[in-house]
Amino acid sequence: MMKKQVSTTTMNPFVYFLINYSVPIIFAIVVAFALPLSGLSVNNVVRELMIRISRNTFLILALLIPVMAGMGMNFGIVLGAMAGEISLIFITDWHIVGISGLLLAMLISTPIAIIFGYFAGIILNRAKGREMVTGFMVSFFMNGIYQVIVLYGMGNIIPISNPDILLPRGYGIRNAINLLSIRQVLDNLIPLKVGTIPIPVATFLFIIVLCIFIVWFKKTKLGQDMRTVGQDNEVARTSGIDVEKTRVLSIVISTVLACYGQIIFLQNIGTMNTYNSHEQVGVFAIAALLVGGASVTKANITNVFIGVILFHTMFVVSPRAGKELMGQAQLGEYFRVFVSYGVIAFSLALYAWRKRVERENERRKVMDYRKSILVKN
Amino acid sequence: MKEKIKKIVEIIGLPRIIIFFFIGSLFVIAPIVGVRIDSSLNDVIVRFGMNGILVLSLIPMVKAGCGLNFGLQLGIIAGLVGAVTSIELELRGFMGFFTAIGIAIFIAVILGFLYGILLNKIKGDEMVVATYIGFSSVSFMCILWLLLPYKSPNMIWAVGGSGLRTTISLQGYWFHVLTDFLKINFGSHIVFPTGTILFFSLLSFLVWAFFKTKTGTAMAAVGSNAYYAKSCGINVNKMRMISVILSTVIAAIGIIVYQESFGFIQLYLAPLYMAFPAIAALLLGGASIKKASIKNVIIGAFLFQGILTMTPSVMNNIVQSDMSETIRIIVSNGLIVYALTRKIERER
């Protein structure tokens, strides 16, 4: 045990690289095997991938800012997704169609997302060092609150008049809502085709703008403060940064971005499962980011893009590969779920293990130093 | 006076007080809206017996400082394999029940051992990693349930002839063997499941007794202060390992008792979220991330099941719609969030 711990610091750089990037490397290998097995043509895979990249990247980018502030993977982006869904219910009720409907949805959802994010941020401040598991439980808890609002409040206290989205009993929203009025309005806003593959230019523009925003944000005063907070709470405090406020802000920004991300995601899908659409948002976004080689303390835009490509290629090919390999498509479905959870489990465990090794090394150094002083005296 | 009330609220915890009042008012309203108290009470007792052991399984890990066992599903998986195998062997009655437990314990020890090794490597981050270990092992088992070569026609899909069904009936195998053991009828609405309660009491007693032994005391010492324990010559990692194995084994037994009472084995994604209600029940009983006792298990399981049984029946009669699922989500997850955000003030 002891020997192993010492050796991690003096490990040769190649092995260190392998451990650091073990998740993307393993993933790339799996995808490389599954791709030919699935029997899908390159054209098909690229077309499918293009859709998936355009609809998922925004959500994954929403995770970056809390990582900067040292709060780990923000499982609370589910809250943002809920805010987005609430606003989509409203615009569907008001029959506002097209791109104006989409923009209005984003506008309405912003204050809701800010409130949700503020709530989550305050709770996470009370659970320092346990942000991830707490964020995860907060998203479960808020799912209950969301049900109270949407299943019991809407049509009752909150006026909803459209009978198409209300349950037959007169209040509460139906399980599935057809978003025909805004379906793919963003994707098709600027039509472009390369070969036979349609490219959703406007969606990509949104993503690029967000990337630029994140790069710019890192350089602002607030961004620098967040990085300091992420490095060390105490150092940040002594240099006059309001640590609590900065942490809450990072969660609020992330929640608002996730809310826009979910709206973009749903306009592509075209239907909304009122009570399930948000459930897996956190898991899939976080798994994709980790597949891109990010860790709990370090994540950048490159990780997002590598992750979204690798993770979703796997998503596209695994059901087909499962069918070809074992004769059961269901197998591939379960495999996808397993991989998503497994990647998160593996990355988090790897990170926790390394953190502990580093901590013990540090302690040993201090001990050695003290011993050397004692010997001198 | 105000200070005093504040202090009491601080000690008991605001969410718990709210829930106590909630349950209290449910019991008051119940007879008014025409819900029979005695049959509800009976439901609570039956469900208590069903879920009690799963809640109990959390105790060793909390005591050894491994936190709340969000990876409870590992034990559940061991229990499921045990149950399915015992049916495959066509064993019935107590024979089938105890064979299931035997196989489950064997698998739980192996899984718990591996789980323990992992948790020892990631001290301090047990909970978040365990959550995802639980999730990923459940989804991994989904693949295995499809592929494992079980043959019993009562368990596999009728169409295709391979792969286990999502729910398997225990009727004719060991359905209610424990529940009906020495059962007592009070009037027409109360059937006391003596066997289940006895079994729960026995396991609780064993856990209690274990923590009086030398190993048990050492384990509790590790939980309250690992550095102190280490300086006393206790092998911290070994103690944690034992606690993890113990928790996993008890969870495996717990799920088998659950199935025995419920009547069905639920496979595939059914166990995915099973850790949370158990954890919420323990917390409701007054436990924290660092402290838990058998008392917490009994009070917690009883109150939590109380909410689950009373809310639907009472609510249905008042508002004509079933809010119980929503209330369950808010209560159970709210309790866990509350426990996680609480400063661990009594940590010495």
Image (cartoon, grey):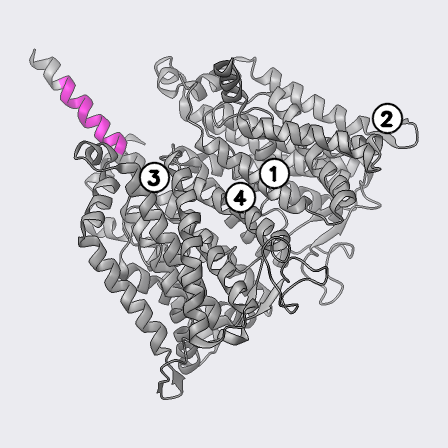
Q: Mark 1 points at which residue?
A: B277
Q: Against A137, is A27 above or below?
A: below
Q: Could you say whether the residue bearing mark 3 is in a helix, strand or loop? A: helix
Location of the N terminus of chain A (image quadrant): top left
Foreground tag (1 vs 3): 1
Location of the C terminus of chain A (image quadrant): top left
Q: Mark 3 points at which residue?
A: A353
Evaluate whether label 2 is on the same chain as label 1: yes
> Toward the viewer: A102 or B97?
A102
Q: Could you say whether the residue bearing mark 2 is in a helix, strand or loop? A: loop
Q: Which residue is drawn at 64% across and 49% down?
A: B270
Evaluate whether label 3 is on the same chain as label 4: yes
For the record, the magenta segment spans A359-371
Q: Name the residue under label 2.
A: B182
Q: Which amino acid does the dot numbered 3 rest on?
A: Trp
State the separation of the CA atoms marked 1 and 3: 28 Å
Q: Which subunit holds the residue at mark 3?
A: A
Q: How many labels does the image show?
A: 4
Q: Against A140, is A356 above or below?
A: above
